[in-house]
Image (spheres, rainbow, N blue to C red):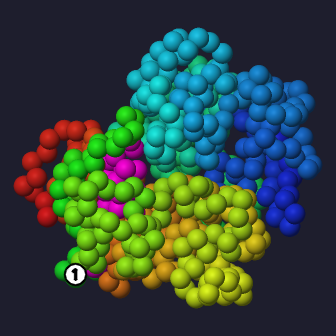
Amino acid sequence: MTSPLLSLRGITKSYGQVHANQAIDLDVAPRSIHAILGENGAGKSTLMKMIYGVEQPDDGTLAWEGEPLTFASPVEARRKGIGMVFQHFSLFETLTVVENIQLVVPGKKADLVERIRTLGRDFGLEVDPLAHVHVLSVGERQRVEIIRSLMTDPKLLILDEPTSVLPPQLVEKLFDTLRRLRDGGVSILFISHKLEEIRAICDRATILRGGRVTGHVDPREHDAHDLARMMIGRDMPEPMPAAPLSGGERRLEIIGLDYRPEDPFAVELSEITLSVRAGEILGIAGISGNGQSELASLISGEIVLPKDQRDRIYMMGQDVGRLDAAARRKLGFAFVPEDRLGRGAVPEMSLVLNSLLTAHSLNLVRHGLIDKDKAKAFTDDCIRQYDVRTPGAEIEAGALSGGNLQKFIVGREIMLAPKLLFVAQPTWGVDIGAASAVRRRLVELRNEGMAILVISEELEELFELCDFIQVLYRGRLSPALIARDTRSEDIGRYMIGAQLSPEKGTA
């Protein structure tokens, strides 16, 4: 048998009372694509951080090509040939793409720009090398992380949710790239909650539950249902059937909105028109970087509209063009941004204090004073209802795994009982069990009369959730398509800019 490229024995890591990893054994073979499966909080990211030198184990040993291994930092890991793409990005927002890559990859700027563009074309990871990171969408930032790792010529590449922000057309192209890397001698550790992807790309899978290894399998020999059951320890509930459309009042209406941003790297929006009624879910599909973040900021009130455009957005029947984010929330609007850390939550603050960011109006603050008992009770209720895996309400938001933080933010906004809920990337980085629960809850809320707008880059999610789907491409929206009468191929054509006759399946 071929000796493992990487071997872990008895790896253990705890953070106070949280036992993230307990006696983990893992072998990664040369020229393999090895999946790490587990729910949010199962210990996947912690384990990867120890392999990459970000964290040190409390106990256990690591071996690299048969030799004992101890990394004091990611720099040492990269020198050995280990690269990693984190779920939470490690980019400097005030620097350009190429400047971020220069921090890790040596070379002249002009040469690196050309390499970035070439890799982008070859791997379906296009991004402007000269754009500043702060203007990039979440999807574009993920592309930068993947390109940066590929440019270090790794022997082992760790990918944490690499396809979560890629459109369907480019996932298979990325998989072709990963297969070429594997055949060229690179091993890949692949973390994903998309079980069909794991079955398609991986030749081995290690399953974690509660910080322990519960099995090693060949995912190609099991269907997605079996893998889900092994991962979460129970059968998945069936999707909630759609209820008939209610034809309720319009809770959100945008009429012919144009937006010309001052930032030259931002996306212009042209003639944006959409409508969401009570008892409906409208989904917006599209490849990341086509104006999703600009549209989200305009709807949420984070961007002030120019004077000639302030009569284009209505919420609950009121013109909100002149209202800021707080005033829109007072009308019954709630928002889950795609950027969890920074916009959805403050990482250095406790979950209790993060609850206050948007839930303060629920009598959690009175006369300028925080009611600590009520704030904690609200937070504890959110943790319980949405199965947020955390030692308690006082833990810092930044200490949670990405999926658990997402569950907390989604739960916090739903608990505000809004009339209009806007969710960007509702299940990004969330495991299959939690994603199913979040989607079921959104459908329940729709059936109870809430108006819901969803931006997602996962077509399967949009078809499961939505009554209508529109596609955003280069700042323009397609007609509203009736989800049940529309094929994913039709949505895909809009996503790449192809013209599609809107006669069939158009609302």
Nearer to the camera, 104 or 202: 104
Tell me the residue at 40%/63% (across/down): 300
> Is residue 212 among what the camera can see?
yes
Q: Where on the picture, by quarter, is residue 255?
A: bottom left
| Residue 191 horizontal side relative to residue 297, left or right | right
| Residue 26 horizontal side relative to residue 174, left or right | right
Q: Was residue 217 drawn as part of the magenta stretch in this picture?
A: no
Nearer to the camera, 211 or 482: 482
- SS for tag 1? loop
> Is residue 290 among what the camera can see?
no
Q: Where on the picture, by quarter, is residue 401?
A: bottom right
Residue most toward the left?
A: 503
Q: Which stretch did the figure color magenta?
A: 278-300
Q: Position of residue 343 (x, y in %)?
A: 54, 58
Residue 9 drawn above or below residue 150 = below
Q: Position of residue 441 (x, y in %)?
A: 45, 76
Disc 1: which residue: 249
Tell me the residue at 26%/56% (across/down): 307
Q: Was residue 279 drawn as part of the magenta stretch in this picture?
A: yes
Nearer to the camera, 361 or 382: 361
Tell me the residue at 22%/39% (across/down): 497
Residue 364 drawn above or below residue 454 = below
Residue most toward the right?
A: 59
Tell me the residue at 87%/63% (across/down): 16
Residue 249 drawn above or below residue 41 = below
| Residue 138 horizontal side relative to residue 81, left or right | left
Q: Position of residue 218 (x, y in %)?
A: 61, 45
Q: Position of residue 169 (x, y in %)?
A: 35, 39
Q: Residues within 10 Å of mark 1 (few under 14, many from 20)?
A: some
Amino acid under disc 1: Glu
